[in-house]
Image: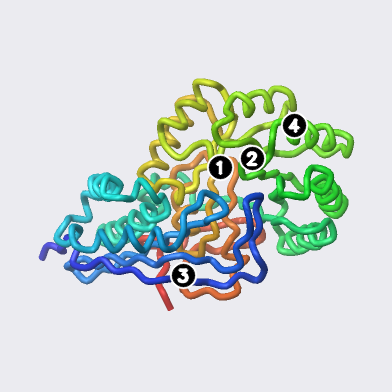
Amino acid sequence: MKVRSSIRAFTYTVLDIPLHAPFGISGGAQAIANNVLVAITLDSGIIGYGEAAPLPPYNGETQADVLAIYKNASDWLMGKECTDWRALASEFRMRGGLNCGSAQCGFEMAILDALTQLEQIPLWKYFGGVSTTLETDMTVTTGSPLEAADAAKAILARGISQIKVKIGGPKGTAYDLERLAAIHQVAPTSPLILDGNAGVSRLAARELVEGLRRLKITPALLEQWLPKDDLEGMRDLAIQSGWLVAADESVCSKQDAEKVAILKAAQVINIKLMKAGIAAALDIAEVARKNGIGLMIGGNVESILAMTVSACFAAGQGGFTFADLDTPLFMATNPFTGGFTLTGGTISVAHIKQGHGVIPR
């Protein structure tokens, strides 16, 4: 008997998850992950789950934006075939998803989870099956030098060696350099990814580079220090510092990635599924590979559900040098079962047999 693959129901609900402490970036802080859980039910009874994780300090998207887009999607999706997921992703984007990448992403996660359960394959294999493991960093968010040092010690105690540090807050470069010196003192051999979330000016960037040289700190990666439209500044930062530069906020589409490639503005692109969805992320990865640009996988403040999808994406595709999939560790509760396993800094999805393997408790 043929398993039915048409969509019978599309539902969504608020997913508010408290954090152990506010997650701070240069644009602000979030104390609760105000996300949305999505479910797509097929005629066969299979249910696929997705998560939209808007992050207002990152790009202005809110939970209310996601809910409004999902409300409009409930009717037109009925009866559509999940096997046509790319076509459905395009239609969803045309009907409103373009204005909220996290809503687009949650929808695509749910439909791909349903599809790969239908086909009885794990999501990591659907994406290519190149690998089943990744090495993730863990983030030191905004905070005092003492708090930064304590956070770095806790990261090392988990067995995670690579440390990502949020910089570019309102207290200026001297404060950031104090924090970085404190981290380097307790973790002198840890590779450091310094993430400005587009909140660092050209002048501040020069001051940071000079200060890091005085401190004898050589970062592994400078992630999106400058405003997202300042691609020339980004290119110059890489040339003048001699360090790897990653584009994050600057790249939300295939066209954005092509601009970065043409200008040689960055050596790495941080692909976050929440920026524009999975279909767009596949296109961005293709542009990066064609142009010899390295790949990083990251995310917003996401639960184990969305982070597992990102792990399946990056491991299955292969070739991701950097991974920043740590936000489940910041959450005070876990409303799901399943998902990737974490041993030290090593993420594994090898045990997942169908879909992404995450379901609500």
Helix or strand or loop: what does disc 1 sit on? strand
Sequence-wise, which precedes: disc 2 or disc 1? 2
Relative depth, front residue between 80 and 196:
196
Determine which residue is flagged by label 2.
Answer: 223
Amino acid carrying mark 4 in the image: Leu
In the picture as drawn, the residue positioned furthest to the left comes out as 1
User: Which is in the foreground here, disc 3 or disc 2?
Assistant: 2
Task: Give x and y (percent) for residue 274.
Answer: 45, 51
Residue 149 appears anywhere in the view: yes
Amino acid carrying mark 3 in the image: Gly
Decide: is 260 above or below 121: above
Determine which residue is flagged by label 4.
Answer: 203
Mark 3 touches mark 2? (CB < 8 Å)? no
Residue at 63% from the left image edge and 62% from the top image edge: 343
Relative depth, front residue between 193 and 69:
69
Sequence-wise, which precedes: disc 3 or disc 2? 2
